[in-house]
Structures are given as C-alpha cells and as structure tokens.
Amino acid sequence: MTGAHPGFRRNHAKGICVTGRFESNGNASALSVASVFEPGSYPIIGRFSAPGTNPARPDTESKVRSFALQFTLPRQEQWRTGMNSAPIFAVRTPRAVFEQLSAQAPDASGHKDPERMAAFLRAHPEAQAFNAWVDSHPPSSAFFNAAYFSINTFRFVDDHGGSRYVRWRVVPETPYRPVSTGAQADPDFLEHDLVERLKHSPLRWHLMISVANENDPVDDATRQWPAERDRDSIDAGTLVIDRAQSQIDGPCRDINFDPLVLPHGMEASNDPLLAARSSAYAVSFYRRASEEARN
C-alpha cells in the first residue's frame, strides 16, 4: 500500500491514454453477430497501464502490462475490455482476491508478513500457476511489443442463435523484447518510449479469438486452455494506435473499462470474477470522480 492518491484509479493508477481504430476484416462474423465483427473501421480509446495503486511507481517494478479498450460501434453500442500481458489470473473467486490483498497488506508498522502470504498460497495453490508464468516470462521492454489477453471467458452468439465460449488476445506486430537493465535509468520508460515511437508510425496488434473445446474451463481464469486453441484462433482484424495522450486530461480519463459493457452478440460467461471486476471498477470510478469534483 502506498497511501491515498485522490483522483487516481484504485488499481492500475499509472497509465497513458491512446486513440486509434479497429479495422475489422469480417472473419469473426461467423462466431458472433456483434457489430464489431462486421467489416469496417471503428474508433477506439485505450489506456496502457501497469498494476499498482501508486501513480508514481517506477516502471521497472512492474512485471505485468495492461491494455484497456473501448470500441465505439454502430447502433450506439460499445465494447469495453481490460486485458493483461499474463494469460491467466492469480485466483479464481472474488473471495480469494480479498484474501490475497489482505495477505499482501502491510501491518501497523508498515511491513509485510511473509507468513501471511505463505498461508495464502497454501490455501490457494492455484495461484502458483500465475506466479510460475510471470517468473518464466520476463516483462516486455515496452507497452507496444507485448501481447494482451482477455483472461476471462466470454460467450459469443451467432446469427443462428448458437453460442461458443471464447477468449481473445491482441498480438503485436512489433516483436517482443524483454525489459533491459538500461531501462532502469528512466522510471517512466514505458510511457516515454510509447510517445516517441508514435511520432514515427502507428502501432498495430491483431485481435485473435480462440474458441473453447467442450473440455476447456470457461469459469476459471486461473487455468490456461491448451496451446492448440491459440494455434487455431481466428484473426478478427487489426487494432491501430496512432496517438497517445496524458491520462490526466486525455480521452481515457473518464472511461470505466467495465468488462461487462458488451455489444449484442457478446455475453459474460459464469466466471465469478467478471461481476466482481465490474462492481470494483464502478466503485473506483465513483470515488475518483468524487475526489476530482471536490478539488
């Protein structure tokens, strides 16, 4: 914990706004009637960030990158999604999230108790999969050379009323590079490198949709699907980011990237984290908006 930071998000406090478009190629229209998969170009507002409550946290302390998006669609619809550079989440339920945060919290003296975290991990062995993934995948050297994953599962409905469970990821055209020790000289290298790169050319990711097999878990964000799901995924189009703006007054500032804001043809699965994320984001949005209004 780093104390109060009025006006900032309660998690992912440090970030930067971006804008661009999604160029849908129509390939995913057989999976869902969602308007975002109709061929065309749709405006997007996004936000790159890293987990944490401190907006001044050095980028070198972050092992995970995050990318949130809002698509503006026909028929006055929107699609909002928040993605992480890790394909799974540490715990499965809202109760486990609370227990994890409690185990990580410092005591009255400001120190963390390693035994509390050890006890949490004994009670939640599923969290070991996330820790193992992070330990074996060095963080990217930039926001723009990381892949980002939906983590949770969603349900797509097609024009015949049939449904499929899916997860998605956005894959960068810029090759991945791990962060280097040289980046430590700049505590804000992720933002600075993004702004500098966009001076020269737009950045692109491909929206890849993976469809579940009948044996794949669809309500457990701690479990990955088999690798062949990604090999068989559908390229639904290209995300193009061409501008970056400060989060203080940029277009992403007042967006609550609620994962349950979905267009017709996309629905939530029974993953219990989805409703919890939606509720927590709403509380965070209300609190920071109230703090800004008072200042």
Image (cartoon, rainbow, N blue to C red):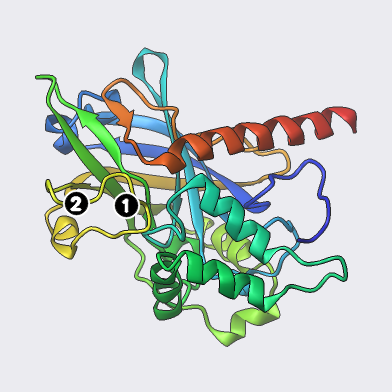
- Farthest residue toward the right? 295
Name the residue located 32 percent from the left edge and 52 percent from the top edge: 169
Instruction: Name the residue nearer the viewer: 99 or 64.
Output: 99
Categorize mark 2 by other alpha carbons within 10 Å: few (<14), some (14-19), many (20+): some
Q: Is residue 68 above or below residue 198?
A: above
Q: Which mark is residue 66?
A: none
Q: Is residue 16 above or below residue 231?
A: above
Name the residue located 65 percent from the left edge and 64 percent from the top edge: 103
Q: Is residue 113 above or below residue 68?
A: below
Residue where numbered disc 2 is placed = 216
Q: Amino acid at mark 2?
A: Asp
Residue where numbered disc 1 is placed = 169
Q: Quadrant of residue 247?
A: top right
Q: Secondary structure at mark 2?
A: loop
Asked if one can make out residue 163 in the rendered structure from this viewpoint, the answer is yes
Q: Position of residue 53 (x, y in %)?
A: 70, 55
